Amino acid sequence: MQAIVDLSGKVGLITGIANEKSISTGVAESCVEAGAKLIVTYQNDKTRAFIEPVVHRLGVEHVYALDVTRPETMADVQAKILEHFGKLDFAIHSMAFAKRDDLHGRVVDTSADGFAMAMDVSTHSFVRMAKMVEPLMEKAGGGSLITMTYLGSEKVIANYGVMGLCKAALEAATRYMACELGPKNIRVNAVSPGPLMTRAASGIARFDDLMASAIERAPMHSLVTPEDIGALTAFLVSDAGRLITGGIHFVDAGYNIVG
């Protein structure tokens, strides 16, 4: 497939690949096709085994451990990027977590520790990532940060629970950081895909019903694919998106306007 944007000479960090069907896999594919060099991260040895087919197929040579709950791993990744590349042009944040009971239960029943954990991994990790890559992007003369959100941030989605609160905070963080980092020519955006079956989505009760509803109600009567998300993300991190920042960008066949 011919790339629709040019990322030649750009270096990007991709987080959140879980397997071949991950959103981040589609993003990585689009970025590689556009000519970018990638750094891919994994949480632990167990998760690395699942991403090996993806990094091997895409020819990614730089694969690093990154657990956002362990600050030393973030510092280690920053140091390795600086050592091997001397800069970073873009970074993709695609990670979220909530305890199953908090995800499926009522928001008013959310435990304090469960709320804190969900907000830390799903939202504040994006803030920490921005701080980690800021000096690397300054060396590139600017850069682009992308996070993945969902419509549950602004509309009540059944069985999405506390994650809706996390995504709302994530989108607010996107706007605030876009304002703060803009003077350094660093753009911050969020991509909001429609429902698609990923490992993360499999933890949401009755997700098949949500996908069926999206097909029925979306103006284009179609589900989004990781490739669709990758195409939009590659555009946003490219020079073609050089003045786009602070936005929530939907790729969902128009479902958000009727959902």
Image: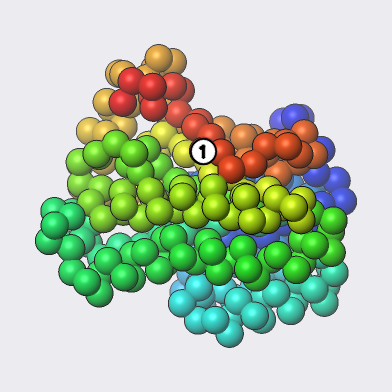
Q: Residue at x 56, y 38 (%)?
A: 247
Residue farthest along the top direction in this orientation:
219
Q: Quadrant of residue 48?
A: bottom right
Looking at the rendering, in which quadrant would you find the N terminus? top right
In this picture, is 55 found above or below 239?
Answer: below
Amino acid on which disc 1 is placed: Ile
Q: Is residue 119 left or right of residue 207?
A: right
Name the one closer to the observer, 250 or 24: 250
Q: Residue at x 50, y 31 (%)?
A: 251
Q: Is residue 57 something that shows in the picture? A: no
Q: Position of residue 15 (x, y in %)?
A: 57, 60
- Residue carrying label 1: 248
Q: Residue at x 46, y 23 (%)?
A: 253
Looking at the rendering, in which quadrant would you find the C terminus? top left
Helix, strand or loop at label 1? It is strand
Name the one closer to the observer, 200 or 78: 78
Q: Position of residue 255 (x, y in %)?
A: 38, 24
Q: Is residue 221 something that shows in the picture? A: yes
In this picture, is 181 found above or below 222?
Answer: below
Q: Quadrant of residue 89?
A: bottom right
Q: Residue at x 67, y 60 (%)?
A: 13
